[in-house]
């Protein structure tokens, strides 16, 4: 994953850093994402065990959750569904990080679980930041590397 991107000014126009939960059982990716998002000015909570997400989120409500779908023992679908059915967490946007986004049954499952959107692994750092900013309502469109 490329991290040679200057993200120091991404969240400058925001007075309070957005709290983002990054949930993935791949420790190496989790650490990369945590470092990337901290450089971008976000407050980051990295969680490698999906069974802890709901409890931690109730104590320290995130502004957004980046969620791997393929984890064990609790899948990203189960975590998103738990959040969707919680009065305190139902409005927290969830962005799935997945390698199987294009399969129709997974797209339907994401919608049923309340997942707002997804980003396909592997992804570029700028695409991830753009997706986050878009979901948080700070951008009107997502970054498209094919458009100049």
Image (spheres, helix red, strand yellow):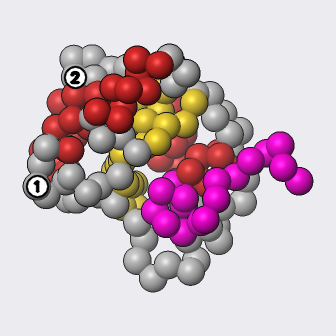
Residue drawn at x 68%, y 39% is 124
Judge by depth and name the residue closer to the eye, 47 or 76.
76
Mark 1 = which residue? Answer: 87
Q: Is residue 108 above or below residue 90?
A: above
On the rendered structure, is 64 left or right of 130?
Answer: left
Residue drawn at x 83%, y 43% is 146
User: Looking at the magenta stretch, what is its main secondary structure?
Assistant: loop
Where is residue 83 shown, x and y percent of the image? 20, 44
Q: Give the residues in magenta.
A: 132-148
Judge by depth and name the residue closer to the eye, 68 or 33.
68
Judge by depth and name the residue closer to the eye, 51 or 147.
147
Q: Is residue 140 within the magenta segment? A: yes
Residue drawn at x 29%, y 55% is 92
Mark 2 = which residue? Answer: 74
Q: Is residue 129 above or below residue 26?
A: below
Give SS at disc 1.
loop
Q: Is residue 38 within the magenta segment? A: no
Q: Separation of disc 1 and disc 2 at Cα? A: 21 Å
Judge by depth and name the residue closer to the eye, 130 or 90.
90
Residue 61 lies in quadrant:
bottom left
Residue drawn at x 58%, y 28% is 121
Is residue 113 in view from this perspective? yes
Give SS at disc 2.
loop
On the rendered structure, is 39 left or right of 85?
Answer: right
Residue 76 lies in quadrant:
top left
Of mark 1 and mark 2, the one earlier in the sequence is: 2
Where is residue 48 shown, x and y percent of the image? 32, 32
């Amino acid at each position: 994953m490329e991290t040679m991107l200057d993200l120091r000014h991404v969240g400058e126009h925001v007075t309070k850093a957005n709290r983002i939960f990054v949930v993935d059982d791949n420790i190496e990716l989790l650490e990369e994402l945590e470092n990337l998002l901290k450089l971008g000015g976000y407050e980051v909570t990295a969680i490698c065990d999906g069974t802890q997400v709901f409890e931690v989120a109730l104590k320290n409500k995130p502004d957004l959750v980046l969620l791997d779908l393929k984890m064990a023992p609790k899948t990203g679908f189960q975590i998103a569904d738990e959040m969707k059915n919680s009065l305190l967490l139902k409005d927290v946007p969830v962005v799935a990080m997945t390698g199987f986004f294009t399969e129709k049954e997974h797209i339907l499952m994401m919608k049923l679980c309340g997942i707002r959107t997804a980003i396909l692994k592997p992804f570029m750092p700028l695409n991830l930041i753009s997706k986050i900013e878009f979901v948080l309502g700070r951008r009107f469109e997502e970054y498209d590397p094919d458009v100049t």
